[in-house]
Image (cartoon, helix red, strand yellow):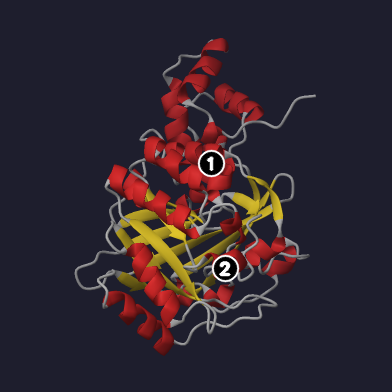
Amino acid sequence: MAGPRPAISEIPHPALAAWLTARGEPAFRAGQILAGAHRPTSASFDDLSDLPMSLRGALADAFEFSTIADTHVISGDRGLTAKAVHELADGQRIESVLMRYPARGRSSERTTICISSQAGCAVNCPFCATGQAGFGRQLTPGEIVDQVLHWHRPPWSALGDGSTGHYNIVFMGMGEPLNNADRVFAAVRLLNDPERLGIGARHITVSTSGVVPGMDRMIDELPQVNLAISLHATTDALRDELVPINRKWPVREVVAAGRRFAARTGRRVSLEYVMIDGVNDTDEQALGLAAHALGWLSHVNLIPLNPTPGSRWSGTPAAGIARFGALLRDRGIGVTVRDTRGRDIDAACGQLHAQLAGRSLRELRAVEVPA
């Protein structure tokens, strides 16, 4: 019995050229096909009008134009943020988020696309809706890339022709990217491929909850890609509760891996820290975080906790976040407070999957959310 058709978004150029040659077609058409399939105006193989009709039909028989079977998009933040709920061929549902940031002062307009690497997540962080929903399966490279391609096409055309700003891809959606490292690394190379979307490696960030072997692999295989570490606590006792993977790779090992990455690649590592009122926002935790971040190429991102169904915790008030940040800055640590986006549509950090359980896309389409 034949397996599922491979996605055109993940077919290597040599494999596509070999497929063409076996059909008696010139190998140079591989470049035409890949370029055409990644054009914003292309919604199917029929739109590759520079190819013979017979070849377009053969491509449709052999490959999936997109691994995404259906998508529902919800807009928020007055149109600056949009969340896509994607349904895959086997019924699994994942989410991606588009965030636009208008030009301010000397900074130019920019767009960030947050994508998923797994259907669900097995890390089981108790403040994260995705983790509480459990793990479905690994995503393929095509399923990862096709999330970006969704935003690349009308009516969004987030990447456009590159003339209106710069674009960032962050693996901060559903799943732990480094628990799916082979496929995530393949997807990064596909996104970076100049024959496809050509997104610069330095505009791609892989986030991890602390998978040390995966971080060490990034040093050798993806040295130009940015690394973000979801730390969230500075002692093993607390991090064991907030980020259960800490029981396998404790805080000091995780920070040491971040140090190795920064030293070997020259790339600054982001230490992500969600702020939970009365839990990890104490002076003791701030001083511990400063000690972990001091003396190497790192930067701390403080993230206000976003509400999720059934959570027993609340976010640290703004004054508490400011105090925590000041303690870090007083010790020479670079700090940014994350601009929370998409909270009104369950698209903010930790909220993905909150709307999915037991609801069809048809039902989700019936939910009106103010743009």
Q: Can you say whether 231 is above or below 31 in the image?
A: below
Percent coordinates x, y for residue 161 in the rendering: 33, 48
Q: Quick one: quadrant of the N terminus?
A: top right
Q: Amino acid at mark 2?
A: Ala
Secondary structure state at the residue bearing disc 1: helix
Percent coordinates x, y for residue 244 in the rendering: 62, 61
How crowded pointer 2 is (Cα within 10 Å; few <14, some 14-19, many 20+) is rated as: few
Q: Can you identify the residue that label 1 sits on? A: 181
Q: Amino acid at mark 1?
A: Ala
* In the displayed structure image, the side of residue 313 where residue 285 appears, left or right: left
Q: Nearer the viewer, residue 272 or 284?
A: 284
Residue 102 occupies which quadrant of the picture? bottom left
- Disc ID at residue 227: none
Q: Can you identify the residue that label 2 sits on? A: 237
Secondary structure state at the residue bearing disc 2: helix
Percent coordinates x, y for residue 195 in the rendering: 38, 33
Q: Could one spot residue 336 in this view of the protein?
A: yes
Q: Earlier in the sequence, mark 2 or mark 1?
A: 1
Question: Mark 2 to mark 1: distance in Å?
Answer: 27 Å
Residue depicted at x 50% and y 67%:
235
* In the displayed structure image, the side of residue 268 where residue 150 appears, left or right: right
Q: Can you say whether 203 is above or below 10 in the image?
A: below
